[in-house]
Image (cartoon, helix red, strand yellow):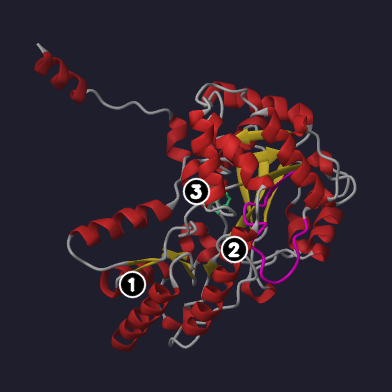
Amino acid sequence: MPSAVMESTTQQQLRLARRMSRLGTETAFEVLNRARSLEKQGREIIHLEIGEPDFATPANIVDAAVDALHMGWTHYGPSAGLPDLRKEIADYVGRTHGVPVASEEVVVVPGGKPIIFFTMLALVDEGDEVIYPNPGFPIYESMINYVGGRAVPIPLREERDFSLDVNELASLITDRTKLIILNSPHNPTGGVLSKGDIIAIAAAIGDRNIMVLSDEIYSRLIFEGEDFSIMSVPGFKERTIVLDGFSKTYAMTGWRMGYGVMRADLATHIARLMTNSNSCTASFTQVAGIQALRGDQSSVDKMNAEFKRRRDAFVTGLNKIKGFSCRMPKGAFYAFPNITKTGWPSKKLADALLEEAGVACLSGTSFGSYGEGYLRFSVANSLENLTTALAWIGTWVGKNL
Ligand SMILES: Cc1ncc(COP(=O)(O)O)c(C=O)c1O
């Protein structure tokens, strides 16, 4: 009697594991769903909520994937990644970071995010402290809480151009600190840590046995300032896990391919987590990944030039809107205006802009408590749409503030 079975199963209470109550989320996907449902009702919405390049993946990479499929790269591969791709990544990271990197120190995973997930699972015990940027990518705090760690925020303040205060960081380090998360260029603020800042951070950590997760997913998207990693500081290679990937640099968010670079002994444990979760990253995408790193890079330069043009126009436009003031972000593709002078709390303003002005953006509080007073707009949309969004926000502000 299938219907009776159905009835009895739906009457059972769902007994979730306790840890699920500690797992957070990424609001961007919720706002996207809300925006899509408004569109279904016939509303016109400009999407500035999601952090993904609006460009197509460069043709040489797509062709490499199609060829790989035809050549039979449709089977399981090694959990840590295809040897040729690991070697290509090791060479690339070695070259850009000025340190020798071996293939055994690279683990290829489906996107940059799993490196956050696996690092927490592999390193953080209950009660261990993890220092993370706030505002910051929400998955850091979510995962620290999920594994039972203690989330210790380091505030990023506008007056410091969203770079962290090294003395404040030093004051947060304790005997329980297991991991420090750095992210430069930074989501959501667009801040970039200078070489001087990074050297000072390294000095604050000193020779303590603390690991650093250096999230460098936007490393190729720097407009002002320099790309410098703590992995390059003498003595820090064995304490650094570099997170990078293909999503943002090559407009490959939907392909799901990223990587971590770390000491070889840790890499074997992260690969074991891959064996237990995904088995491996899709093989044909990895073949295309080799092409992405080895092939012509002019499409990356073109995308970056376009992001810069949009950033300049959008931030200039935001600064003309009453109650908004926005620093020029130095990297990534986000604008993070201060909206305290509007007198509105961030979430309420973001909701009103979506519902009433037709512009989808994120509340600064989606990135942690220190994001109150700010909104995040992604400039990964056409200049034409960005210009229209500015006009719609301006009109809404004119009527409501
Ligand atoms: C700071 C940061 N780290 C990691 C990621 C994850 O990237 P991926 O889509 O490759 O998993 C993102 C994506 O938005 C990000 O902003």
Q: Is mark 2 within 8 Å of ligand 1?
A: yes
Identified at 56% across, 48% down, the residue is 60
Q: Amino acid at mark 3?
A: Thr
Circle on res. 104: none
Indicate if the residue with disc 1 has its beta carbon within 8 Å of ligand 1.
Answer: no
Whichever of labels 1 and 3 marks the residue nearer the N terminus, that label is: 3
- Highlighted magenta segment, given as a residue range: 210-228
The residue that appears at 48% across and 78% down in the rendered structure is 340
Q: Which mark is residue 253?
A: 3
Residue 19 in the image: state x and y as whole percent: 47, 33
- Pick the quarter of the image with the C terminus: bottom left
Asked whether 301 falls inside the magenta stretch, the response is no
Q: Position of residue 79 (x, y in %)?
A: 61, 24
Q: Amino acid at mark 1?
A: Leu
Task: Determine if residue 145 is in view.
Answer: no
Residue at x 55%, y 65% (from the top left corner): 333
Which residue, given by chain and number where applicable, does mark 2 sit on? Answer: 332
Q: Quadrant of the N terminus?
A: top left
Q: Is residue 339 visible?
A: yes
Secondary structure of the residue carrying numbered label 3: helix
Residue assigned mark 1: 353
Give the residue at x 47% y 88%.
Answer: 320
Whether 99 is drawn above or below 10: the answer is below
